[in-house]
Amino acid sequence: MRKFNTAGPCVEKKHYMVPAESRLPEIPQLVADEAYVVVHAPRQTGKTTTLRALAKKITTEGDIAALHFTCEIGQAAGDDYGAAERMIWRSILRAARGALPEELQPPEAVDSEPGSYLLDNLTLWAEVC
């Protein structure tokens, strides 16, 4: 039984919702053009739901691995940038596990100096993809 949701990201099978991809129809072309995209809107307007749906659509339809994840977890590390990078990388791994097929999963992390850990692992992942 579906219901209206006002408490977080919507799940299409559980909640009534406008199709998420229709909210920002220009995003797939911007991604194809390698343009930067910033989504800014008030709380509870569907940003997370829309970005998750767009990432799934882009990954499914093309030759791009798109993933929605958050860097917010790194805030808990304060000024310890090395710890923040590792926390963000773990956030990426968790998001990838639920959203990407096996062949697009991030590889084992390489250990790097603080300040380059995240960049080194994202670079390695891009090369593997």
Image: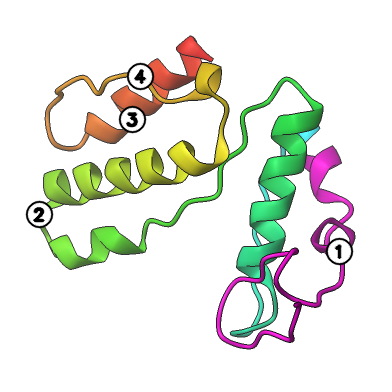
User: What is the quadrant of the C terminus in the image?
Assistant: top right
Observer-side mark, 2 or 1, equals 1
Q: Residues within 10 Å of mark 2 (few under 14, many from 20)?
A: few
Query: Mark 4 — residue?
Result: 107
Residue behind mark 1 = 19
Q: Could you tell me the amino acid type at mark 3?
A: Leu
Residue wearing tag 3 = 119
**Quarter-of-image position of residue 50:** bottom right
Q: Extreme top residue here?
A: 128
Q: Earlier in the sequence, mark 3 or mark 1?
A: 1
**Distance between mark 3 and mark 2 Cα atoms:** 16 Å
The part of the chain drawn in magenta is 1-30
Spatial CA distance of label 1 from label 4 is 32 Å
Instruction: Say if residue 34 shows up in the picture.
Output: no
Identify residue type, mark 4: Pro
Q: Position of residue 83 (x, y in %)?
A: 13, 48
x, y (%) of residue 21? Answer: 83, 56
Q: Is residue 118 magenta?
A: no
- Provide the secondary structure element on which disc 2 rests: loop
Q: Which mark is first along the chain, 4 or 1?
A: 1
Q: Please state which of the two labelled residues, at mark 3 or mark 1, is closer to the viewer.
A: 1
- Closer to the N terminus: mark 4 or mark 2? 2
